[in-house]
Image: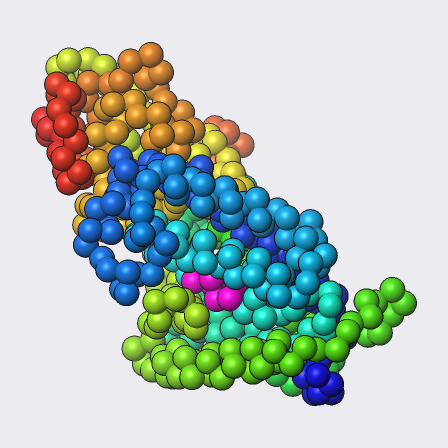
């Protein structure tokens, strides 16, 4: 097929960056699922997949695991996805016929969709839908056999527009501090999982915080419209998005959200013909027809997300179809002013008294030890650590799984302990565990120099009553089956 308008050969390098980067994100996502699922959603997990499948139909949540579920099958799917992602990252999809390349991308999308759609609260965040939506469009980006299709590049820009503009609108319509340019007086300290530079970002002078917020508004509310203008304006807009996303990467841990947004920005960055650029063959008629069909599909499915953008009751990070094909995005419509953390402790003493010695469990990413500098984990996603932030905000949010988490600690469950950084009871499980609620704040420069502590914390009180070990009984699967002292 020789349609001059259809092909965009100047975007071959941008497509290469986008596809290889997307394969890397898929790899991280599948490895994250493989290493964490048993304790979270496995057969003995905090919210088991088999229980979910008994309540929810295939039509409501399409997944291959409706056909059959076992932990071994889930692990096989996750590691298969990881292996295929690694192969695509190394260029395998460019060394096979176009149809096979599309099948590889489609399999990645289908495997991850199957995981997300049974992942429940652990997979209920915008970066999951963003990976699926980007992964679906990548099926139709083509490979080295054909020039990048312009329509798919436009669809990727439309996705980027919704990511950025949706995030900008949810802020502008939400917390008043965004309009007053004061949200970053709090956000770097109270975000779900700070990174190693978050302390330094928080301690920037307040005028710089105002500048950060103002630049964010420009990038999210004005720049997205420039993505659809002729070159070189679209390229400058894409590079502006890249710059602001890298700033966010440096300031915190947001899984692969920022990295995916960076990759999407390359859909707007055009190159120029250079020596060494691949010579693309003619576009097959069937491929052109498939691209046009998916463009029409996305246009139709975009009605509700576009309507949501214009609504005063804008939803944040919502999917309007069960396949996560066209979604709405946004983050931090409200900013918490005070950081609360749930700290879990255990004791091996039989009786609890005022003199009982409690020992603290250490998490990998969330704040705990006040002297421990926050670590950089993104794009890898620590799902339990992330949800512990929400647990501190709302005990009812964590009610479906938190008591079971404590029960697993009473058992020294190996899968659960692998999600933690330290286990204070390596030889024998504790007799009692408890959860306390603390207020955390970043120390000042003076406090850091004098104490070596990055955080200061103040006990608020019990998060709930202590939970005690009892004689072994069958796990009822309810998530609330531990004795409470």
**Quadrant in the picture for residue 439:** top left
Residue drawn at point x = 45 percent, y = 45 percent: 77
Q: Position of residue 96 (x, y in %)?
A: 69, 58
Q: Nearer the viewer, residue 112 or 425?
A: 112
Q: Nearer the viewer, residue 405 or 152?
A: 152
Numbered disc total: 0
Residue drawn at point x = 72 percent, y = 57 percent: 95
Where, quadrant-wise, is the C terminus in this rendering?
A: top left
In the rendered image of this protein, does residue 481 appear above or below residue 204? above
Q: Position of residue 438 (x, y in %)?
A: 29, 38
Residue 206 seen in the current view: no
- Magenta stretch containing residue 133, yes or no? yes
- Magenta stretch containing residue 472, yes or no? no
Residue drawn at point x = 57 percent, y = 73 percent: 156
Image side of residue 231 versus residue 413, left or right: right
In the rendered image of this protein, does residue 283 appear above or below residue 20? below
Q: Position of residue 116 (x, y in %)?
A: 38, 54
Q: Which stretch appears magenta?
A: 127-136
Image side of residue 481 versus residue 176, left or right: left
């Amino acid at each position: 097929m020789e349609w001059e308008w259809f092909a965009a050969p100047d975007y071959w390098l941008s497509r290469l960056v986008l596809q290889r980067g997307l394969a890397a994100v898929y790899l991280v996502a599948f490895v994250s699922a493989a290493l964490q699922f048993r304790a979270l959603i496995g057969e003995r997990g905090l919210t088991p997949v088999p229980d979910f499948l008994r309540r929810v139909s295939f039509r409501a949540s399409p997944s291959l695991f409706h056909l059959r579920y076992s932990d071994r099958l889930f692990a096989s799917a996750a590691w298969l996805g990881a292996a295929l992602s690694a192969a695509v990252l190394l260029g395998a999809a460019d060394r096979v016929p176009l149809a096979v390349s599309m099948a590889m991308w489609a399999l990645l999308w289908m495997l991850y969709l199957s995981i997300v759609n049974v992942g429940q609260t652990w997979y209920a965040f915008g970066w999951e839908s963003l990976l699926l939506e980007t992964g679906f469009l990548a099926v139709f980006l083509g490979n080295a056999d054909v020039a990048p299709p312009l329509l798919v590049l436009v669809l990727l820009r439309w996705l980027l527009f919704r990511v950025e503009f949706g995030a900008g609108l949810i802020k502008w319509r939400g917390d008043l501090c965004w309009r007053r340019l004061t949200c970053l007086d709090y956000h770097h300290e109270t975000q779900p999982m700070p990174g190693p530079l978050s302390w330094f970002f928080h301690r920037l002078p307040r005028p710089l915080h105002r500048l950060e917020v103002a630049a964010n508004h420009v990038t999210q509310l004005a720049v997205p419209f420039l993505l659809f203008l002729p070159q070189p304006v679209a390229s400058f807009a894409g590079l502006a998005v890249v710059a602001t996303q890298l700033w966010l990467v440096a300031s915190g841990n947001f899984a692969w959200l920022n990295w995916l947004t960076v990759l999407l920005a390359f859909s707007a960055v055009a190159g120029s013909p250079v020596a060494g650029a691949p010579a693309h063959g003619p576009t097959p008629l069937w491929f052109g027809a498939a691209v046009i069909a998916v463009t029409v599909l996305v246009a139709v499915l975009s009605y509700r997300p576009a309507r949501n953008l214009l609504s005063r009751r804008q939803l944040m990070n919502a999917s309007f179809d069960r396949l996560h094909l066209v979604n709405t995005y946004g983050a931090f419509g409200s900013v918490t002013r005070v950081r609360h953390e749930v700290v879990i402790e255990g004791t091996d003493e039989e009786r609890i008294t005022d003199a009982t010695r409690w020992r603290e469990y250490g998490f990998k990413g969330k704040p705990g030890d006040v002297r421990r500098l926050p670590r950089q984990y993104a794009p890898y996603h620590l799902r339990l650590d992330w949800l512990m932030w929400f647990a501190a905000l709302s005990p009812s949010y964590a009610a479906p799984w938190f008591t079971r988490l404590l029960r697993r600690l009473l058992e020294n469950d190996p899968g659960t302990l692998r999600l933690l950084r330290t286990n204070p009871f390596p030889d024998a499980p504790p007799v009692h565990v408890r959860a306390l609620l603390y207020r955390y704040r970043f120390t000042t420069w003076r406090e850091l120099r004098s104490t070596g502590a990055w955080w200061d914390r103040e006990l608020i009180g019990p998060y709930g009553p202590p939970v005690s070990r009892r004689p072994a009984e069958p796990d009822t699967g309810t998530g609330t089956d531990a004795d409470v002292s």
